[in-house]
Image: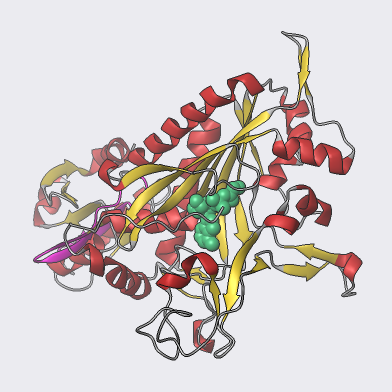
Amino acid sequence: MHSEGHEGQPANEFNRNEVMDKLVALCKRRGFVFPSSEIYGGINSCWDYGPLGIELKNNIKAWWWRSMTWLRDDIEGLDAAILMHPRVWEASGHIAGFSDPMVDCKLCKQRFRADQVVEASCPRKPSVAPGTAGCPGELTEPRLFNLMFQTYLGPVEEEGARIYLRPETAQGIYVNFRNVLLPSRQKIPFGIAQIGKAFRNEISPGNFIFRSREFEQMEMQFFVKPDTAAEWFEYWREARFNWYLGLGIRPQHLRFHQHSSQELAHYARAAYDLEFHYPFGWRELEGVHNRGDFDLTQHQQCSGKDLSYFDEATRERFVPYIIETSAGVDRTLLTCLIDAYDEEPERVVLRLSPQLAPIKAAIFPLVKRDGMPEIAQRLTAMLRPQFKVFYDESGAIGRRYRRQDEIGTPYGITVDSDTLIDQTVTLRERDSMAQERVSIDRLAEKLRELLS
Ligand code: GAP
């Protein structure tokens, strides 16, 4: 689960090293993402999504949901509770195994992940890694530190009431395997998809929203006959790679990393990280795992409930194998922002794919007179039920375009003096800045075509 640590080749493109700082500033300035509880100084590694951030996030989730559940008839949706019976986490192996080995410095009392200590710096002497020559402190032997957040169910804080915030959404799917199978009348192979919050008390959160302590996952568990698992694993690996291409991510920024036997999580028989080339190196964007029959067998044993499947066609009974695709919403959002960020001499452009863009079209009167604002406002009201649009009449038109380019709005619609004569408007495309005249009657249809 925590195998994101390997470095990639150096970035060789425009400004990639500086992109993170610029994006963090842009996200704050334009209302995408800002630190949680900021007026109190923020809380480490928790983030709030502002007006544009939530639009982008919702668009990502909707696109995933659509591709998983609407466009296929072999995947069902689910929304399980975040709080689950504590025995779920015994069965899943998270109580025993969801931990990172940590070392503590006896001098400065700082804690570091044992596998990342060489990349860290000693707080007293930042030029050296903790525990290495020149570091004044001394490290303890590695000890396991569980990453699950704990709380208590009900008013009494006693051992029997201890529960956990889920560290992955997947378990909500496994324990509901039969609850979904029976009413949906699915047959194996079939899948269950879920989007929801997950929580991990990460030791080294960081890189903005890349690794935080509260985040969202989009997970799909595909239940298959054991002897077909290898085939389905390959199928989902390819499908998930292509999904990111469909979001507009450049293929040269994506690659797979296969887990070695040392890297495999306790549940996995085989696993690939789909990695993206972040400005801070190649890191996991999504995991595709062959989990074998680990999860259903564990829950069957711990709950005493039969979770096997009877195949009518072959008259066989078996515990299904599971192929999991596990993506992070926040990480996908960061990936899309990084891949879309571009600078030209005159402007910053977020080349977001139109289906993801928070605002689909901005509508401007060229000047604030001659009835142009009224026409532009009428257009805004006409388009609003179908698209997220934005009306802006303040400032020079070039500046208004640039403000939209910076947040990725794919189309600009301008009402000018010709509109008063021939009922057409200028439609400007963000990336090429090409402009065409479109009749007001055809505008909604034209936008629908462009955005579909
Ligand atoms: N159910 C399997 C599972 O949770 P994982 O590799 O630990 O596997 C899957 O996590 C995905 O969830 C990651 O690829 C990443 O996109 C996202 N993710 C995991 N931990 C995260 C964190 N602390 N902050 C943001 N996203 C995270």
Which residue lies most toward the front here? Answer: 133
Image quarter for ligand 1: bottom right
310 lies above or below 450? above
Res. 357 in view: no
Q: Which residue sits at x=58%, y=24%?
A: 73
Q: Is residue 344 magenta?
A: yes
Residue 280, x across and y down, in percent? 33, 63
> Could you tell whether 224 is left or right of 409 in the image?
right
Q: Is residue 372 magenta?
A: no
Q: Quadrant of residue 349?
A: bottom left
Residue 63, x across and y down, in percent? 45, 42
In the rendered view of the protein, which quadrant contains the C terminus? top left
> Could you tell whether 43 is left or right of 407 in the image?
right
Q: How is the image coloured?
A: secondary structure
Task: Point out the stretch of residues depicted in magenta.
Answer: 342-366
373 lies above or below 321? below
